[in-house]
Image: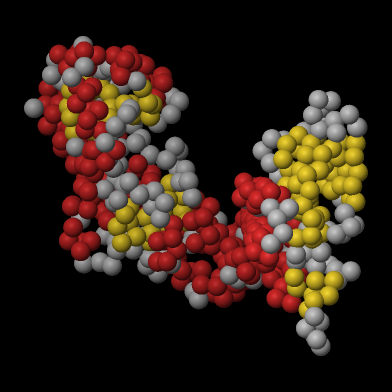
Amino acid sequence: MLDQQMFPLEQIDIVKFRPSDLSEKRTFDCHAILVTIGGKGEWRIGEKRYALDQSGKVFFCNPGTELLYTSSDTQQGCSFYELSFRVYEKTGREGDWVFVRKHGDLLAAGEIGSAPYHRIRELADSLHLGKQESTPADAFRIQMLFQEMLHLLWKGQEEAKLDRSESMIEKITAYIEEHYDEELNRDQLANMVGISQEYFSRLFKTKTGTNFSKYLSELRIKKAQEYLLTSKSSLREIAQSVGYRDEFYLSHKFKQVTGDSPSFYMKRPKRIASVSANYTGCLLALGVTPIIAKINPFIQRHFRSQLEGADVQTVDLLTFHYNKLIAKASPDLVLCYDSYEDLNELRRIAPTVAISLSSLSWRDQFMLIAELVNAVGKAKEWLERFDEKIAQAKRLLEQKIDTTETVGIFEIWKDKIMVFDDSFGRAGQVLYEALRLPPSQRIRDEVFTKQRYKIIPLEELPLYATDRMFVTIFQGKGGDEYAAKIMASDVWKSLPAYHNKRVYINDHDTFYNWDPVSTEYQLVKVMEQLTG
């Protein structure tokens, strides 16, 4: 018990190892704190090696610890403060303090990497300067400063232990998430990080809030839910894909974890969290209101009555990290795009369908979401009506404009100009995919072929200019001021589309999404601009 022990500072010295010696060895007969002052070379404490540098380090040595210094510079050795102390304990009968000759290690020997070096160095300087002072007040002050140093060291090592335990659990959970479909057990994972099975169990539950067996079962069932929603695999195939021997055992575990059988789970309505404003638009268009919805202002206005009558939390476009909100809501399903930064964390919260932006068109994404919410018929009817409107629009364009003229889609933020292809909203699906209007060759080669968008400087804008330019200004990213600067520039005024009055400035809120309702509205606005 620390309250029954005392750790008075007995000696503080500056020790120097000379560069002329190839090596120096030192064995400590009591506890010692070593605070490096300067120098180069290497220390070996026990089996561990530490490179010395100018940044400063703090070490701890228990009685019997051996320090070996090896020089790496013939011009410079190393120097350090050595603070020695012993441990005294209070006796139970008389309450006297007695020196403990044999004492367990107070701290692990070696570097205390989490200790605040600069503060400990300040304390060592003060202690060294004050060691010659002999008044009772001075002695009390010295011991008080030393106790602060000990406190910082203990705190630093506890933080280091916490960091190591966090690292262990991160390593274990990452391994489980990658190998959940294999045979896994507690002993195997404990051996992997070099700890006992009992300590593994305690640590895992402390850090995750549950035991290993339950954690693995819940992860496997979440994966099974994702397979059920997104694949055409049989229940037996899904069982084997998530690490279970057959469909019967999967059904048993599925009901144990979720309370539903797999077949009932597929049929019942689900509480959905949408991480994408586009997927929110798709859901609302199908008559489904998510419980958490990332949303843009146009969709929020369009579906005002549907949203006002529902229990839904909305998140704006400028919010990117809100997994805690999703975890608190405990959704049955999360809809997310596959490049979402916190995708793995989402999958720990709930079954997550990560939809590919690169391999699926906006129509494919819409139909996939319709399948998830059992609204395929409604989605097909909507697309058929939309295709009729597209056919009418194309016939009108052929009469009104030269359909071989190139079009480009540009967006202005506070410090950059972006060029988009046909898969990122901003009417790209309308202009390029539906109406079949061509981009310039440069945009096709550099944007369509390589990536969905490209950031360009103002001086390169003429290289990407097209006969007709559709421009959005992202006010939420401070685009207004930069747009005014761009449009007042000689570069902008040299563009053919500017001279021909074929630059169309569109509202970002309206043109951001590629959900069906936004796409349909963008078609109307684009046709007004092209034929007006």
Spot the residue most to the left.
532
Residue ranking furthest to the front:
135
Q: Position of residue 172 (x, y in %)?
A: 67, 57
Against 463, residue 306 (above or below) is below
Task: Tell me the colour scheme of the image.
Answer: secondary structure
Q: Residue 48, relative to residue 29: is it above or below?
A: above
Q: Is residue 431 visible?
A: no
Query: Which one is nearer the viewer's eye here, 260 or 190?
Result: 190
**Quarter placement of the C terminus:** top left
Reply above or below: 494 against 484: above
Q: Residue at x 85, y 30 (%)?
A: 19
Q: Quadrant of residue 476?
A: top left
- Is 325 situated left or right of 169 in this image? left
**Splitting the image into 4 quarters, where does residue 103 fall?**
bottom right
* Of residues 241 and 381, the one drawn nearer to the viewer in this rendering: 241
Residue displayed at 69% across by 35% down: 54
Name the spot of residue 104 as percent of width and height, x first.
84, 67
Residue 94 in picture, x, y percent from top left = 80, 86
Q: Seen in the image, is 441 located left or right of residue 203?
A: left
